[in-house]
Amino acid sequence: MIEKLKKLAKEYLVSGKVEVIFGLREKDNHLAPHIFTKVEELDSLVVSPQYPLFYTCRPSKKNIIRLIEEKYPDIKIGVIVKGCEERALIELAKRNQIEMKNIEILGVACSREEAVECKCPRPYPNHPLLGEKVEGVFEDKNIEGLLNKGWSERLAFWQSQLSKCIKCYGCRNACPLCFCQDCAMEQELWSKIGEIPPEIPMFHFIRFYHLADRCIECGECEKACPMDIPLLTISKQVRKDVKELFNYESGLDVKQESPLLTTLDEMPMKEGANE
């Protein structure tokens, strides 16, 4: 499939349908995001479920696509995306982090094997140009096991898991939707500074609340965690709750407004407010 993708990308570039292409490049046995401007460069184009195209975009509005759009307002950008990456694009656009008007999406569907590996429920873009839409992965052994246990056992499970946290911020830094100028997880008001493990469960629950309406279930937080905390299990459950409560799924439509209108930045709690 990669050869078909290279051919398609070259056709887009030669025809002028796009002026640059944003995708993954392999060089010296390393993979990294790259802006392709020449046809011959596309020979090094790759697609991999192990290497995301979008990383955390802090500070706000300083991601690579936004910077290109600001310098070249009329440029046409082709972006090669898997399902989770398209969802990231949509959420970034929804929150004014990028502009979609000049972006041409080249969608690639993942295989069933890749979906299983990433525990992805929707392993394809809305309109894939390459690959076939395959069944996603909805089950999670941790969730299934926990739901069959009592509250005390669930609490013990998460206390055990979250107590492993070394407060490295790897989960935040790997997330493509963490772009706040000032991270609430670093503020003394929400999380005590210098405390490891951080206060349970406040530190992680702040993050899960803040991402409840934007998480695309890409699993990069869990992949980045050096302590193997099952962060994706919580993300999956939060997304499920948001869908059941509000009939809302993030990453599907730029025009679909979030049902959660408040954030920790907009309405911070103050000490003594309830006294």
Image (tube, grey):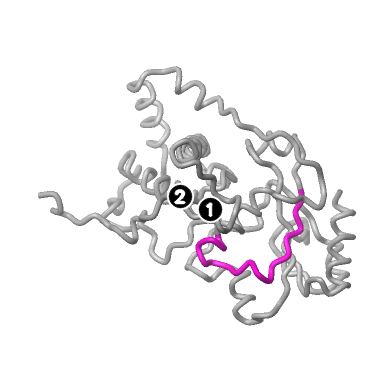
Query: Mark 1 or 2 closer to N-term?
Result: 1
Kind of residue sitting beneath label 1: Cys
User: Residue 125 in the image: x percent, y percent?
Assistant: 70, 49
**Residue 243, placed above or below residue 155:** below
> Which mark's residue is nearer the viewer, 1 or 2?
2
State yes or no: discs 1 and 2 in contact (Cβ < 8 Å): yes
**Is 133 left or right of 154, judged from the image as shown?**
right
- Is 240 in the magenta? no
* Residue at 87%, 66% in the rendered image: 10
Quarter-of-image position of residue 69? bottom right
**Is 263 left or right of 188, judged from the image as shown?**
right
**Is 4 left or right of 252, judged from the image as shown?**
right
**Of 52 and 226, the residue lying toward us:** 52
Quarter-of-image position of residue 150? top left
Q: Residues within 10 Å of mark 2 (few under 14, many from 20)?
A: some
**Residue 141, placed above or below residue 54:** above
Question: Where is mark 1, residue-wise?
Answer: 175
User: Residue 151 in the image: x percent, y percent?
Assistant: 34, 22
In the image, the segment drawn in magenta is: 92-108
Question: Where is mark 2, residue-wise?
Answer: 211
Kind of residue sitting beneath label 2: Leu
Confirm whether residue 168 shows in the render.
no
Secondary structure found at label 2: loop
* Residue at 56%, 43% in the rendered image: 217
User: Residue 105 in the image: x percent, y percent?
Assistant: 73, 60
- Is 99 in the magenta? yes
